[in-house]
Image: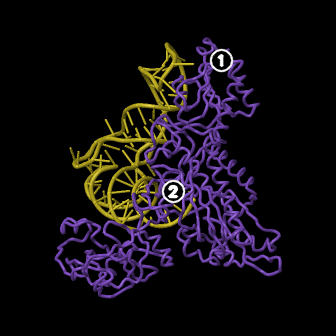
Amino acid sequence: MRWSKMLITTLRDNPQDAEIDSHKLLVRAGLVRKLTGGLYTFLPLGLRALHKVTRIVREEMDRAGAQEILMPALQPSELWEKSGRLVTMGPNMFTLKDRAERLMALGPTHEEVVTDLITGLLNSYRQLPCTVYQIQTKFRDEIRPRFGLMRSKEFIMKDAYSFDTSYDAADQSYLAMYNAYKRIFSRCGLSAYPVEADTGDIGGKWSHEFMVLADAGEDGIVSCPECGYAANLERAERQVAVATAETECPAIEPIDTPNAHTIDELVRFLKCKPRQLIKTLIYMVDGKPVALLVPGDRDVNELKVRRLLGAKKVELANDATVEEITGAPVGFAGPVGLANPVDIYADQSLRGASDRITGANRADTHLLHVDLARDANVKEFLDLVIVKSHDACPHCGKPVEIKRGIEVGHVFKLGTKYTEAFQTKYLDEKGAPQLMVMGCYGIGVTRTLQAVIEQSHDENGIIWPISVAPAHVALLSLDPQDDSVKAVVDMLERELESRGVEVIVDDREERPGVKFKDADLIGFPIRVVVGAKGLAKGGVEIKERTSKDFELVPAEGAVEAIEQKVRSLFAKLEA
RNA sequence: CGGAGAGUAGCGCAGUCUGGUAGCGCGUUUGGUUCGGGACCAAAAGGCCAUGGGUUCAAAUCCCAUCUCUCCGACCA
């Protein structure tokens, strides 16, 4: 393939609207072009790389025994009513009406469609287990698309769904996908690792996310270097020391704290430590106000609250509600003496908390010497807070670390959430109808592509792992007019292509520097340089994108040497 | 949706405060000199200054409204 004939436009400057390196490089290397926020066109080079990823995904899905299907992106909204997700997923969905005024949705995911499909398709234990997958464009009306392909309104997802006769059997299907995922990401040259995750709107009992470590990642990952525990920050738990026997707590004493609304202000004013304070936050849980108590140096994890209280929606109450519940302006809430008592939940670390400072539910006043057991009516002690670095690992008690990561895949044990809603049953050996047990498994294909770039680049550009590179080899013809150079270039292109090595020949009338810069920017794993000078010195130059030096190989032996290099780069990824 | 910033040539930007002929660099086209890590000289093409409305003799510039994009929070592959 000839560079001069291809639609390749590299940019010297970073695009003004890109923030993270991978996004800048996607645009600068001419892989994608933005149409508008959250919508991108894949240009030839970008599409080639994307196809590499989808091919790997396909191969590994097939190897794991999943069967490829293709479901409609356009779906009737009744399906979503049936599963009850029109409410939870609703705002994220693009909906429209057909000419008969029927409400339709552009699929953000396909649990509904696939469950509906299987319900009518399979009805015997003999047909199970069954795992199907598709690679398809998904649509989500993201509140804030960002970072290029990382979070966009339209993206390509591989979604797979498993159907089994029992929870044990479903565990096997889950494991098969889990292992396939590990292979997929390592074949893409990514170091992705699984962490425990929240199941969110998809639902189900248990899930793992596959995370690519990157500072630009949107997720926090809690991990324990000691025992290997790893979880999404949203999900992560911590061990809490058993409350020691407290000394006798003095009687409650109000204290004036003018204008001290925040923990910081209080700490400065009272000259105490944040952990001596108890933060009282009024939350709306499915429309009902509750009070949540956490230590002064902690933040509430709203996802945990949602899960523990079995709620659909959890949000901080507005100022008016806070004033109504506490009888005081925002900033002075406390568990003792609420004007309109509500259910009080406290973080587990506050069990036995004594001699603490809380708001007094009165303007500019706090209470000293509060003993939760004695003075407050706590309904339940729960794990409510966001884990911090150095917290105790929930498994082994050693301090945990917090890193950032990009979620490239997510596997869920769904159980019967959807098969129940759709009455997806099979007949067992005794002829009795049973609900199927489901799992679902997603990979953000376009996001994975960007994650590769985020994890593998330098100041000169992308460093493609050979498995996903737009082409294996960039063949630079430094003197396109020179007959001997031309002869070698033509021979190499022909021979390499006949052996299945993908080559892009830079045959442009450009100075060498331009070609070197572009080859580095786009990030071809192998660079072959043919120039009059090199030929005079004895041959062509072969260089890996990752190394500084090149090998000079006689033109006659170059094809073998290049093919060898391609093979060994692939072998490294398989290892 | 809340908070912050930005829309001027394909890309990156100046000009806006203080109204008066729309500019620079890269890229593109043509000619020439160059040619192993983003060359140089000369010439050229390319703009409804986001949109709509005002103010003014005169608006990229001042005022009002709208739209779009980017960043920080909640959502997610």
In the picture, which quadrant includes the N terminus of chain A? top right
Question: Can you tell which chain is drawn purple?
Answer: A
State which chain disc 2 sits on: A
Say if B8 sits above or below A285 in the image. Answer: above
Q: Position of residue A228 (x, y in %)?
A: 52, 55
From the viewer's perspective, is A25 left or right of A489? left
Residue ID for mark 1: A485
> Which is more N-terminal, label 1 or label 2?
2
Per the image, label 1 sits on a secondary structure element best described as helix
Q: Using the rendered image, report if marks 2 and 1 lie on a common chain.
A: yes
Quadrant position of residue B1: bottom left
Say if A23 sits above or below A161 in the image. Answer: above
Say if A316 sits above or below A574 in the image. Answer: below
Looking at this view, is B40 or A138 the one in front? Answer: A138
Q: Colour of chain B?
A: yellow
Q: Position of residue A282 (x, y in %)?
A: 36, 78
Residue at screen point 46% across, 36% down: A459
Quadrant position of residue A373: bottom left
State which chain disc 1 sits on: A
Residue at screen point 39% across, 71% down: A242
Q: Which mark, by number, is residue A227? A: 2
Per the image, label 2 sits on a secondary structure element best described as loop
Quadrant position of residue A96: bottom right
Q: Position of residue A441 (x, y in %)?
A: 64, 61
